[in-house]
Image (cartoon, rainbow, N blue to C red):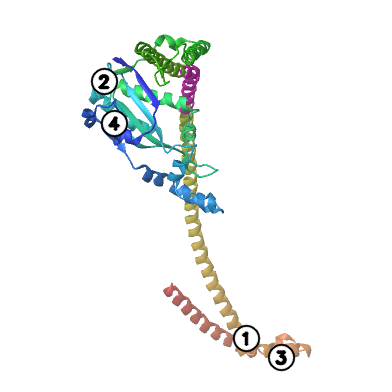
Amino acid sequence: MKKMSMSITKGRGNQKHNTRTQTAKPQNVDFSRTEDNITVIDENIKDTYHELFDSALEKYNAKQKRKDRKIKDYYSHIANSKKEKLFHELVVQIGQKDSRPDQKQTNRIYEDFVNEFIIANPQMKVIGAYVHNDEATPHLHLDYIPYTKGNKRGLETKISNDGAIRQMGYRNWEEWKEEQFRTLEKICENYSIEREHMNNTERHRTVEGYKQEQRAIEAKLNEISRELETSTREPKKGLFGKETIDYETFRALEQENALQKAQIFSLSNEIEKHEEKYQELKNKPYRLKNKELEQINSELEYKNRQERKMRDYWIEKEVEKQVGEIQHENSILRQESVRQGKEIEKLKAENKKLKNESIDQEAEKMFIYTVLDKLHVGNFVRKVVELLKKGVHIDRIEEKQYENVIDGAKSMFEEERKQTRARQRDRGISR
């Protein structure tokens, strides 16, 4: 596996430079190779602003009572702002001038990085991704619009790089940048490239050692500045009173100035490298702790999932048991209901029979009353009672009177019995 340096830095965000549409031609660009550049993404920034912020801007303006607080166009508002930038940029580079992957491989790595960046950073809308192969070392310019959501003050959705980083779960830019490095390293591993940490001996320095080096570099810069300010060379006066120096002195000053500029540039680069190492040393314990916490969290999530599965399993079993019991009880109740229904039908039949018998009995009773009335039994009884009151013995009442009454009643009973039987037969046929 090859080892190569990797860098991710903040860019200036010059779209004309990225698209090679600038008027001034930079000297570090080989325009004969510009056709090898690749544009992965190139979206209109104004259209993207409308897409991201118009809805939130409309809600914000609707709440404003004063016209001077309303924002007509959010793009223009940010463009004139001193606090926020229209967009931010990352410059990603693999390898150096004399040690880098071939161009096709580099292009694929940068394209993969752009795709992973979009997935991992949902609150950083990528509007431009440009691979420059026409400079000394191929590199990627990645332009994005960072925004926050659900804000209580101002627009619900608005520009904020630091806010977007925090809402995505990072504490600061350095921590977020380290995550981008990890993404780049994983992608490069797929192409058999391993990250080479420059000045590895410095990776084990203490924070105090870093601070001492920073103070030494700062002292050296101050010394160079003082030398430039207190140079003992006095310029000569020319014919017209102008200050001049001889050529040899001029060349010496020029060489010394160039040397000192180179030293300042070198020291500035050292400061930047030391700052990056310092941040890395400072954040290393947190990264290790975060990995430990992530592992613990992963184990807890797995345990919770297993417990939920077991709980759901037993709940399901208990529900099935209760459903079975309820179904069994319902079956018994249905059988009991059928049995009771049959009993009810039987009782109804018996009730109907009793009712018919009661009707017949009532008819016979009425018939008896009718017969008694027709036979004048009441008169007969009264006469008997009168005779008895007069002292006539019951035996002396004429038998013919009894016989007449009994014979008349008998014939009427016989006739009624025939009619009753005929009605019962008719009811039996109808049933």
Q: Residue at x 43, y 10 (%)?
A: 202
Query: Given the image, on which type of amino acid does mark 4 rest?
Result: Lys
Residue 25, label in figure: 4
Q: State which quadrant residue 251 falls in.
A: top left
Q: Give the SS element for disc 2.
A: loop
In this view, the residue in front, 28 or 13, is 28
Compute the Cα span from label 2 to label 1.
Answer: 136 Å
Give x and y (percent) for residue 6: 35, 20
Q: Where does the magenta region start and end?
A: 278-301
Q: Mark 2 points at which residue?
A: 101
Q: Give the SS element for disc 1.
A: helix
- Work out whether mark 4 precedes mark 1 in sequence or the reverse, and give the earlier one: 4
- Badge 1 vs badge 3, beta-carbon distance below 8 Å: no
Q: Name the residue under label 1.
A: 372
Choose mark 4 or mark 1, whichever is in front: 4
Q: Give the SS element for disc 3.
A: helix
Residue 383, label in figure: 3
Query: Given the image, on which type of amino acid does mark 1 rest?
Result: Leu
Give x and y (percent) for residue 211: 52, 13
Was residue 280 drawn as part of the magenta stretch in this picture? yes
In this view, the residue in front, 28 or 85, is 28
- Badge 4 vs badge 1, beta-carbon distance below 8 Å: no
The residue carrying pointer 3 sits among few (fewer than 14), some (14 to 19) or many (20 or more) residues within 10 Å by Cα, namely few
Query: Given the image, on which type of amino acid does mark 3 rest?
Result: Lys
Q: Does residue 383 appear to the left or right of 156 in the view shown?
A: right
- Badge 3 vs badge 2, beta-carbon distance below 8 Å: no
Choose mark 3 or mark 4, whichever is in front: 4
Compute the Cα span from label 1 to label 3.
Answer: 15 Å
Compute the Cα span from label 3 to label 2.
Answer: 149 Å
Q: Which residue is drawn at 42% across and 39% down?
A: 86
Compute the Cα span from label 3 to label 4.
Answer: 156 Å
The residue carrying pointer 1 sits among few (fewer than 14), some (14 to 19) or many (20 or more) residues within 10 Å by Cα, namely some
